[in-house]
Amino acid sequence: MPSEFRKVFAVTAALIPSRGKIFIAQRPPDKKFGLLWEFPGGKVESGESLQSSLIREIDEELCWEIQVGELFEHVHTRLQEFSVDLYAFWCIVKGGSLCLREHVAYHWVYPNELTRFDFTVADQRLVHSLGKLKNVPEGNVTTHLL
């Protein structure tokens, strides 16, 4: 399919830091990119802002209420059948108790450990950028939210 007709999806990702680590989650085996790791988030629905999409997705997937902060990086990835515009934001957990409604596992990982996990193609570019960070922003996830 010529590139000018390729479907482009806007997708958001939450970079949730805590104690120098970043939250990652593993996709379920029956979904596209099954069992690969990702920074949680999802597709932006029609009429949604990037930030409101991310708030909705994290609530739906992880039962966390978040505050969306700065944009860390925008990554454009061309896949065989479509393209993805991925917007990764630093986020702070404001409330809720972690539940896994969409994922099968999760880890808190130091940036230099991210390469040990098999990430989706779009998230691999974020892994590369995060690996260059000297420090991860302060997070606020406490044990009562985990």
Image (cartoon, rainbow, N blue to C red):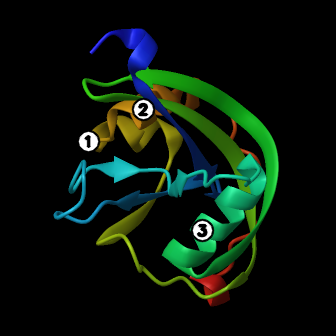
Pick out the residue farthest to the left.
29
Q: Which mark is residue 58?
A: 3
* Residue annotated with mark 1: 118
Q: Is residue 99 left or right of residue 146?
A: left
Nearer to us in this view, 97 or 6: 6
CA gap between label 1 and label 2 equals 12 Å
Residue 134 seen in the figure: no
The picture places residue 131, in percent across and down from the top left corner, at: 52, 29
Nearer to us in this view, 132 or 55: 55
At x 55% / y 76%, what residue is drawn?
Answer: 60
Quarter the C terminus occupies: bottom right
At x 33% / y 39%, what residue is drawn?
Answer: 120
Q: Amino acid at mark 2?
A: Ala
Q: Is residue 118 above or below residue 48?
A: above
At x 63% / y 40%, what residue is drawn?
Answer: 88
Q: Is residue 76 above or below residue 114?
A: above
